[in-house]
Image (cartoon, grey):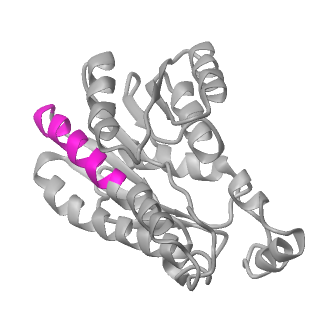
Amino acid sequence: MFEISKGLRVLITGASGGIGQEIAKAFGNFGASVGVHYNHNKKDALEVVKDIISSGGLASAFAKDLLDVSDLSNLIQDFVNEYKGIDVLINNAGANIGNYHFLEIDPQSLTDTINLNYIAPFLLSREAFKFMKDSGGGRIINISSISAKFGGSLQSMHYAAAKSALESLTISLSKAGAEHNILVNTIRPGIIDTSFHNKAPKNNMEERIDLIPLKKMGTPEDIAQMVLFLTSSASNYITGQVFSVSGGE
């Protein structure tokens, strides 16, 4: 049975809904101090904060635009100022910006997708790394996508490429972090039952789910449990790995 240290200081990007929300609540149940990052969805972010506090944890909401470099540098510092350090960074925020055929996608959508899914985690991890290195270690967990394995669709190949870069970053950063006890891993979710996939036509989703060996979508809780495992004592000898939580794909 794994153990989660009480009082962990955990920052989660994109934590106002979906997978990020469940990760935040899961840490709250273990008495963590949780940074609930959001961009536009203040109402839901504050609800997450409220739920965490009611379950015995500490939480604060942090509004930052991860496409804004100045906001990126301030996010880690603001969290550290609030909780006097950082033990865990979860790079969860991500999106397929410009869900268009690759022959039609505009350069700005391409750039924004890469910035959100790769550049932002890179810069946030670098800032968190500096604090973790000076405080005896920490955990960085990147949330990728099954699209990194399959290359995405004609409408999402730029998103898949950004997530592939994120997985490569995991390996490189884990090597840099090893001597400082900073463990870096990636979780690669499959088709998860969130609003991210609810936008697709019903028939398309039914066909996609039929390709999954377990014949069902995963849940945000499935990902949250894997995150907890990777921050627990059971994962003390695990770094530089990509874990698929994808129903067998």
Percent position of residue 104, x then y: 59, 80
Instruction: Look at the magenta stretch and give its main secondary structure.
Output: helix
| 24 lies above or below 199 | above
Verify whether residue 131 appears in magenta: yes
Residue 156 seen: yes
| 212 lies above or below 18 | below
Percent position of residue 32, x then y: 45, 24
Percent position of residue 16, x then y: 60, 35
Q: State which region is magenta.
A: 120-135
Percent position of residue 191, x then y: 68, 66
Q: Is residue 46 left or right of residue 129?
A: right
Verify whether residue 239 appears in magenta: no
Q: Is residue 206 left or right of residue 6?
A: right
> Which is nearer the eye, 129 or 106?
106
Q: Quadrant of the C terminus?
A: bottom right
> Which is nearer the eye, 72 or 195?
72
User: Residue at image x 60%, y 26%?
Assistant: 42
| 211 lies above or below 118 | below
**Residue 168 is drawn in which quadrant?**
bottom left
**Residue 80 is drawn in which quadrant?**
top left
Q: Residue furthest right?
A: 203
**Residue 205 is drawn in which quadrant?**
bottom right
User: Residue at image x 41%, y 73%?
Assistant: 164
User: Residue at image x 29%, y 55%?
Assistant: 122
User: Residue at image x 68%, y 56%?
Assistant: 196
> Which is nearer the eye, 116 or 83?
116
Q: Is residue 189 left or right of residue 164?
A: right
| 66 lies above or below 174 | above
Q: Is residue 68 left or right of residue 130?
A: right
> Which is nearer the eye, 221 or 85?
85
